[in-house]
Image (cartoon, grey):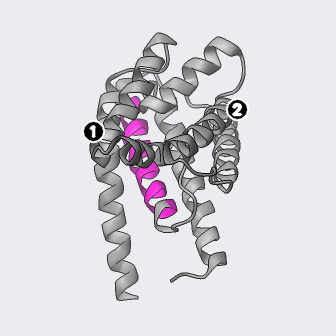
Amino acid sequence: MKDAPIRFIQYILGLLIKTFGLVLVIRSNLGTGSWEAFYIGLAKKSGLSMGMWVFIIGFILIWFNAFLWKRKPTYSSFLTIAMVGILINCWLFFITLHPIHIGLQMSLFWTGLIVASFGASIYLLSDFTPTPVDQLMFALSYRFQISIMFAKTVSELFALLLAIALHGSIGIGTIIFAFLFGPFIQFFIQKLNRKQAIL
């Protein structure tokens, strides 16, 4: 079992890397993940920043997940959504790329997807507090007795429909992200687990 300080450092590092990758995907202008597209759509309609909407929606999901679980909310999740919201806003401020050449867009998108997947694997392996979106998948599975995969699909489709309604960042990248983000995370988790086993 890892010491709490080490887990916390791994958790922060993972979120830092994951959000960096997500912003690269956003800046590619090829489409983002369903939830990110939803946040972007809300930001366009409201004038609030994307990071602020990450926090607002995350806050709502924390209480909704608690309702599904029929238990008190996981209060450490508030730290997670605050961190993710702040980091996304910071990366969006510093990364101002807006490529128009398809080759550069694809390079930026794939780099972002891989980096985000790697960061997600690090933060998940910290066994700290998952994001409210990740918790939603498990809460839906528990409440309605459905598989984790089906619950994940339901939550992603829900976010996608909202993103489409709000004219969020939907494109070919959204499809690629939906199919490969999970498998890439699983790939990196397996690699990191093997490395830890060797060490």
Residue at coordinates 53% horizontally, 43% vertically from top-left? 65
Residue nearest the observer in this picture, 186 or 97: 186
Q: How many marks on residues?
A: 2
Residue 134 tag number: none
* Residue pictured at 35% horizontal, 62% vertical: 188
Kindly identify the amino acid type of the residue bearing the numbered disc 2: Met
Q: Quadrant of the C terminus?
A: bottom left
Identify which residue is drawn at 35% across, 45% down: 181
User: Which percent across, then down, holds residue 4?
Assistant: 63, 77
Residue 52 numbered mark, or none: 2
For residue 147, side relative to residue 67 (left or right) = left
Q: As displayed, is residue 43 above or below residue 134?
A: above
Looking at the image, residue 87 sits to the left or right of residue 163; the answer is right
Classify mark 2: residues with Cα within 10 Å, few (<14), some (14-19) or many (20+).
many
Few, some or many C-alpha atoms within 10 Å of disc 1 (few <14, some 14-19, many ≥20)?
A: few
Q: Is residue 103 visible?
A: no
For disc 1, the marked residue is 179
Q: Quadrant of residue 118?
A: bottom left
Q: Is residue 182 magenta?
A: no
Residue lying furthest front in this view? 70
Report whether 28 appears left or right of 19.
left
Q: Position of residue 175 (x, y in %)?
A: 30, 29
**Residue lying farthest to the bottom in this orientation:** 199
Evaluate whether residue 44 shows in this view: yes
Q: Could you say where residue 186 lies in the image, as x and y percent from the top left?
A: 31, 58
Q: Is 113 within the magenta? A: yes
Kindly indicate whether the residue at mark 2 contacts the one at mark 1 (C-beta within 8 angstroms).
no
Where on the picture, by quarter, is residue 185?
bottom left
Residue interval drawn in magenta: 104-123
User: For numbered disc 1, what is the local secondary structure?
Assistant: helix
In the picture, measured across the screen, residue 104 lies left or right of residue 150, that is right
